[in-house]
Image (cartoon, rainbow, N blue to C red):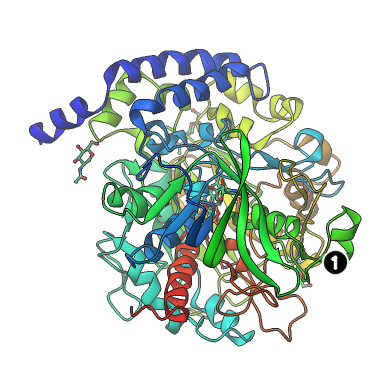
Amino acid sequence: MTARTSQRSLSRPWALVLAFLGLLAVSVSAAEQSYYGNSMLDMMEFMRRGQAQLDLEALDNGQKLLTKYDFIVVGAGTAGCALAARLSENPRWKVLLLEAGGPESYAMDMPIAAHYLQLGEMNWKYRTEPSASYCLAMNNNRCNWPRGKVMGGSSVLNYMMYTRGSRRDYDRWAELGNPGWSYRDVLPYFRKYEASSIPDADPGPTRPGRQGPVKISYTEPRTRIADAFVRASQEAGMPRGDYNGETQLRVSYLQANVYNETRWSSNRAYLYPLKGKRTNLHVKKNALVTKVLIDPQTKTAYGIMVQTEGRVQKVLARREVVVSAGAINTPQLLMLSGVGPAKHLREVGIKPIADLAVGYNLQDHIAPAVSMLCNATSLQIREMFSVKALGDYFRGRGPLRTPGGVEAISFYALDDPKNPQGWADVELFVVGGGLQTNVALRLALGLRPEIYEDMFGDLERSNANGFLIFPMVLRAKSRGRIKLRSRRPQEHPLIYANYFSHPYDLNITVRGIEQAVRLLEEPAFRAIGARLLEKRLPGCSHLRWRSSDYWACHARHFTFTIYHYSGTAKMGPSSDPAAVVDARLRVHGIRNLRVADASIMPHLISGHPNGPVYLIAEKAADMIKQDHNYVL
Ligand SMILES: Cc1cc2nc3c(=O)[nH]c(=O)nc-3n(C[C@H](O)[C@H](O)[C@H](O)COP(=O)(O)OP(=O)(O)OC[C@H]3O[C@@H](n4cnc5c(N)ncnc54)[C@H](O)[C@@H]3O)c2cc1C
Ligand SMILES: *[C@@H]1O[C@H](CO)[C@@H](O)[C@H](O)[C@H]1NC(C)=O
Ligand SMILES: *[C@@H]1O[C@H](CO)[C@@H](O)[C@H](O)[C@H]1NC(C)=O
Ligand SMILES: *[C@@H]1O[C@H](CO)[C@@H](O)[C@H](O)[C@H]1NC(C)=O
């Protein structure tokens, strides 16, 4: 233990830690006054400058781009890193992986820094278009939609919550005309990427993989709040167990993509181990792909245009281009390349090559968190960034290891409550701190300062202990859309979330909130004095406290995204007019072009999608190898 400790502290530059600490102290207090405070950005700038020596990127061979590769993978996110690593297993294929963002750094590894990362330049910083019916508590009625712009993509910004989703999700994909995607068919791919160290995982046919690249473990330490949540859920009749196992309807401490106190991003998992070993894989950072080149006559993709090192260049693909730019950038890039709704493309001056429903079917998960007070000590972000906490972190202990503060989760089938094998429609998860204890979370959400002050100002000043339960709606029926704002690739696309446009969604949201509130009646929560924060949102004060109408109003205000954007290049048979790719992820009507990322989900899975996106990438890699006669 001593040897391990000293080795670790030696391997981490202490000077940097102290500088980080100093900057952070300044940042947090100054940021109280301003939204996206400058000092917060200074901190990110500091992180960026520290990266020269801390660059975790696996394969920076520094060489110039070749004119031609066998495969070009666009985007080094959750899917892209996995795909590039798997395709380059064939030593005869030259693979190019292009990433718009920069390197991943050690600062990003610190699990609790998750909220802070969103404030920096490793986030694309998207925002939904203003709405009169959701995101009402946010600045300009717009929700922030963070996305990773860094090696590892959104797996570097995310909260590391690991879920497979329900078996029913995959069976539904298959039933929609996508052979090979049933739960039984995809199980081997889960096991291929998983490196689970969950000791009490279900042993049966659903057992997790133990040898793959993606680490999964429980996190420690835990607050008493998380313990109370797990026990209260059990007291209310929810069995405790592996929610990634035989059935999803369970409560558990969080299974997380964390290992040895560090975030386990896709870059870490798939590329870092290849350092110095994969000469046929070329990774290029700070490289924005602006177009996929498609021959309009033969409808064949043959390369890309990329903006890097101050100029735009053409790179050719001998075999295929695979787009893994995520559910916002993938539809944007496809449309910029002439693949999308013909009418919309013409509006912005792009000549359509394939008329497909790109950008439609946009899905997300929202969770209008409910604020509770309690007598148990919650995570206080200011105390966390103390010398002691940082010291503990680097010795492998302490609160900074908690992934963004999420500690425990449970799944409910509110529409099928008697069925232990039911299909979850609501997930609850608990964060052992309140909005008042985490300035970064409030900034990341883009909460209106006056609403924050009204609801949480006093609590913040009195250092009140509290926590949040997030009721996450798993199978919303509303669909949003991504559209181009212009034909300029540098410009953010338009995002219409359309939350609550289907009446089911508000109904199930309110029932999810009521389920969370009911848990407070259980003995385990009573024992820590857990209670609702009895404070009405200014915009909902005309409604009866705790009524369904009040909670509906609450949901329209605190429409917190859980960042699961997906579905915008839907997988389906050619008979489905909404489908963009087929079951082998080939773009309909275009040769040598595939999509492999969260965009292809016909329906968003009932859980957190980072794992399922690894699954998509692993399966895509196998299908590509098969289609090019590479023996697996
Ligand atoms: C704040 C946050 C918290 C989350 N928490 C969780 C969680 O706890 N658990 C969970 O399961 N999921 C979580 N998610 C969701 C999960 O991380 C994503 O679903 C997943 O990472 C999506 O993977 P992807 O490969 O589709 O896209 P991404 O990982 O976003 O990768 C896309 C990559 O492509 C790059 N790119 C885009 N356009 C271009 C271009 N034109 N040229 C070059 N490169 C480009 C991007 O910079 C990015 O690196 C969270 C997401 C966020 C943002
Ligand atoms: C854990 O991290 C430390 C510090 O980076 C490193 O020295 C050590 O080898 C890691 N341990 C394992 C088992 O990977
Ligand atoms: C949800 O819908 C059901 C069926 O229409 C109805 O009985 C119930 O009251 C609704 N619940 C809420 C919270 O709106
Ligand atoms: C919680 O604290 C309040 C205020 O100090 C006190 O009145 C209450 O009895 C405590 N409840 C429990 C369960 O400890």
- Residue 188 vs 264, above or below: the answer is below
522 or 389, which lies in front? 389
632 or 426, which lies in front? 632
The percent coordinates of residue 462 (x first, y second) are: 55, 20
Q: Quadrant of residue 270?
A: bottom left
Q: Quadrant of residue 119?
A: top right
Residue density around tag 1, few if under 14, some if 14–19, many if 20 or more, within 10 Å? some
Determine the residue positioned at 73% across, 49% down: 555
192 or 429, which lies in front? 192
Q: Quadrant of the N terminus?
A: top left
In the picture provided, is 118 more to the left or to the right than 255? right
Ligand 3 is found in the corner quadrant, namely bottom right
The percent coordinates of residue 197 (x first, y second) are: 26, 59
The percent coordinates of residue 549 (x first, y second) are: 80, 53
- Residue 191 vs 312, above or below: the answer is below
- Residue 622 vs 568, above or below: the answer is below
Q: Quadrant of the C terminus?
A: bottom left
Number of numbered labels in the structure image = 1
- Could you tell me the amino acid type at mark 1? Ala
Determine the residue positioned at 36% across, 51% down: 271
571 or 422, which lies in front? 571
Viewer can see residue 568: no
Viewer can see residue 282: yes
- Residue 184 vs 74, above or below: the answer is below
Determine the residue positioned at 40% across, 28% down: 51
The percent coordinates of residue 105 (x first, y second) are: 40, 34
Q: Quadrant of residue 400?
A: top left
In the picture provided, is 220 more to the left or to the right than 452? left
Local secondary structure at mark 1: helix
- Residue wearing tag 1: 342
Q: Residue furthest front?
A: 67
Determine the residue positioned at 27% across, 22% down: 13
